[in-house]
């Protein structure tokens, strides 16, 4: 069954299937292109995700690879239709860095999201008021609105998926202690903390753990990062926020950083407060701020 994972992930799933089918048929790209009277570069672009594929061309490939099952052909055609849709985040391309929009496209179709945050509430859990308050300090006024709207649309997009992803967050205690908005609206931060606690209580797919100050030095001190996992055989993706590198970056598959950060996240979970204790602390801090 094709799910609403967004065009980036559906395109990657389709490309993976086409490469697998060609290799199972023991054919090279050059052989397939020659028999279909395509240029080799056309198939290379299709398999590499640099070019879309028409329904007619996809049918030709599937016939060449001996795919006779109507359900399989329809599933792959449905993936192709999804892959060709214009992503909703395209409208932010003039305001948001390309690397980050690439990440947004992958996040939109992830099955599991694991994230460590050292300075801010994770974007997928932020209220509008909190998002505006933290964004206005880091960018010029004209860019605040699109950045906040993108963040909120990411939340809405995941909430609307038929199969929502599981999410696991670890946040440093500094995230919940910093009274964001205290000089303009002291209610922003306690409202944000209550919103986190309420969302975690309401949604069984979300877990949040707090890394307490008493844990001392830990694996997350170098900065925030996110790990994405997918259904369908796609490789894991690591997104390293700008706080941990000169520029934000992504890695996938066999890149050794993926395994390194996966281990880091498991170590963070071992040192963090239990889920129940974490929510108790969050509510307690919210009451203190109120």
Image (tube, grey):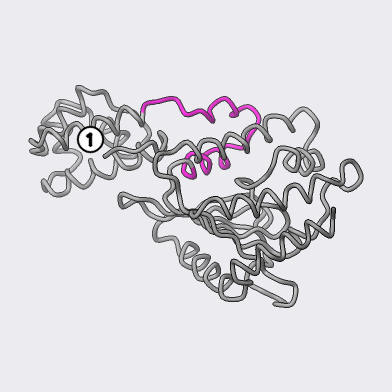
- Check if residue 231 falls in the magenta segment: no
Q: Secondary structure at mark 1?
A: helix
Q: Main secondary structure of the magenta part?
A: helix
Residue 156, image x, y percentages: 55, 36
Q: Quadrant of residue 270?
A: bottom right
Residue most toward the right? 183
Q: Quadrant of residue 96?
A: top right
Q: Nearer the viewer, residue 281 or 78?
A: 281
- Residue 87's place in the image compared with 243, above or below, is above
Q: Residue at x 46, y 66 (%)?
A: 259
Q: Quadrant of residue 83?
A: top left
Q: Residue at x 50, y 63 (%)?
A: 257
- Residue 249's place in the image compared with 59, above or below, is below
Q: Residue at x 15, y 35 (%)?
A: 71
User: For mark 1, what is the residue?
Assistant: 75
- Check if residue 89 falls in the magenta segment: yes
Residue 247, image x, y percentages: 64, 50
Q: Nearer the viewer, residue 237 or 161?
A: 161
Is residue 150 left or right of 108 when viewed as pictured? right
Quarter of the picture containing the N terminus is top left
Is residue 252 left or right of 101 when viewed as pictured? left
**Range shown magenta:** 84-107
Is residue 146 left or right of 113 when viewed as pictured? right
Disc 1: CA contacts within 10 A as few (<14), some (14-19) or many (>=20): some
């Amino acid at each position: 069954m094709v799910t609403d994972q967004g065009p980036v992930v559906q395109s990657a799933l389709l490309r993976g299937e086409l490469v697998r089918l060609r290799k199972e048929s023991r054919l090279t790209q050059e052989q397939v292109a020659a028999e279909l009277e395509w240029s080799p570069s056309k198939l290379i672009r299709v398999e590499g995700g640099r070019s879309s594929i028409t329904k007619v061309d996809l049918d030709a490939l599937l016939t060449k690879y001996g795919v006779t099952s109507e359900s399989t052909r329809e599933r792959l055609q449905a993936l192709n239709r999804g892959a060709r849709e214009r992503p909703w985040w395209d409208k932010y391309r003039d305001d948001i860095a390309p690397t980050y929009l690439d990440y947004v496209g992958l996040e939109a179709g992830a099955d599991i999201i694991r994230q460590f945050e050292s300075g801010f509430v994770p974007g997928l859990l932020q209220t509008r008021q909190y998002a505006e308050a933290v964004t206005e300090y880091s960018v010029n006024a004209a860019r605040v609105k699109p950045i906040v709207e993108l963040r909120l649309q990411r939340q809405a997009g995941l909430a609307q998926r038929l199969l929502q992803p599981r999410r696991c967050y670890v946040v440093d205690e500094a995230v919940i202690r910093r009274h964001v908005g205290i000089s303009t609206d002291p209610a922003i931060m306690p409202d944000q903390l209550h919103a986190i606690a309420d969302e975690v209580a309401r949604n069984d797919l979300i877990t949040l753990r707090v890394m307490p100050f008493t844990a001392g030095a830990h694996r997350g001190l170098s900065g925030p990062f996110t790990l994405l996992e997918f259904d369908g055989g796609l490789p894991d993706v690591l997104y390293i926020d700008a706080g941990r590198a000169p520029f934000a970056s992504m890695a996938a598959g066999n890149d050794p950083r993926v395994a390194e950060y996966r281990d880091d996240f498991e170590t963070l979970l071992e040192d963090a407060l239990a889920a129940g204790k974490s929510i108790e602390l969050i509510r307690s801090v919210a009451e203190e701020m109120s």
